[in-house]
Image (tube, rainbow, N blue to C red):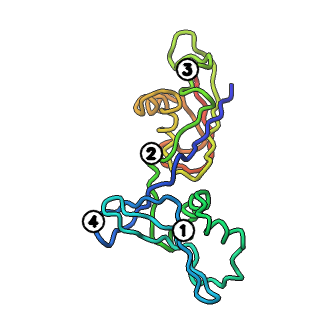
Amino acid sequence: MLENWVVVPTCLPTVLRRCHACPSRRFRTSGKFRVNAHHKLIDAWLLALCATCGETAKVTVLERMNVRSVRPELLDRLHGNDPGLAAELLQDPVVRRRSRIALDWDNAWRLDTGGSDHLDRGRGLPCPGEAGSSGKTDVSVRFAARVPVRPVRLIAKGCGLSRAGAERLITEGRIVSAVRLSGRLSGDFTFTLKL
């Protein structure tokens, strides 16, 4: 049996950088942009607010670019405060490096298992270790956005197990994958659950 799971972002991640007004390092962004034109040059920033004091910080998107070199559809999205563009830009390593930021994805994603909350509920699949359970289930995990998550956390959430329970099944060889399941991943992977 093949299961398809998708890691879906539910909101923009928290931006991690030092606040100049208070000791906080957490900023929220709603996807608002600020665009400034200086004759033939343009600057654009994604605005973020300090979670503690409300101070505004700017994540640099464009810096002293010639207006003619910027695609018109990008300008339209910047002026329209497109939240999809904000998500794309926050995932761009060049933008993150230029602005010296990191992202915190805690509570900003969900796991879509195709209609049921758990692999073992609502699909006729027995729980691991349940009487009468046999065979195996292949699970393909796809990321709709580059959300760094520990695979063992996804497996525990998708199978309705505790994290320790999922780690025990990995140690026992009942959950196997070609990728290392203990680190963080933000790209697609597959694993097999041997029932």
Q: CA distance from mark 4 to mark 1?
A: 25 Å
Secondary structure at badge 2 equals: loop
**Which mark is on residue 21?**
none
Q: Quadrant of residue 23?
A: bottom left
Could you tell which of marks 2 and 3 lies nearer the N-terminus?
2
Residue 180 position, x and y percent, is 53, 44
Please tell me how crowded label 3 is: few (under 14), some (14-19), or many (20+) other residues with Cα within 10 Å: few
Q: Which residue is mark 3?
A: 121
Residue at 62%, 36% in the rendered image: 5
Question: Which residue is more in the foreground, 86 or 105?
Answer: 86
Could you tell which of marks 4 and 3 lies nearer the N-terminus?
4
Secondary structure at badge 3 equals: loop
Left or right: 172 with respect to 3? left
Marks 1 and 4: in contact by CB < 8 Å?
A: no
Q: CA distance from mark 4 to mark 2?
A: 22 Å
Question: Which residue is more in the foreground, 97 or 82?
Answer: 82
Q: Which residue is mark 4?
A: 23
User: What amino acid does circle 4 point to?
Assistant: Pro
**Which mark is on residue 107?**
2
Q: Which residue is mark 1?
A: 33
Q: CA distance from mark 2 to mark 3?
A: 23 Å
* Tag in front: 4 or 1: 1
180 above or below 28?
above
Which residue is most to the bottom? Answer: 39
Residue at 46%, 58% in the rendered image: 103
Q: CA distance from mark 2 to mark 1?
A: 23 Å
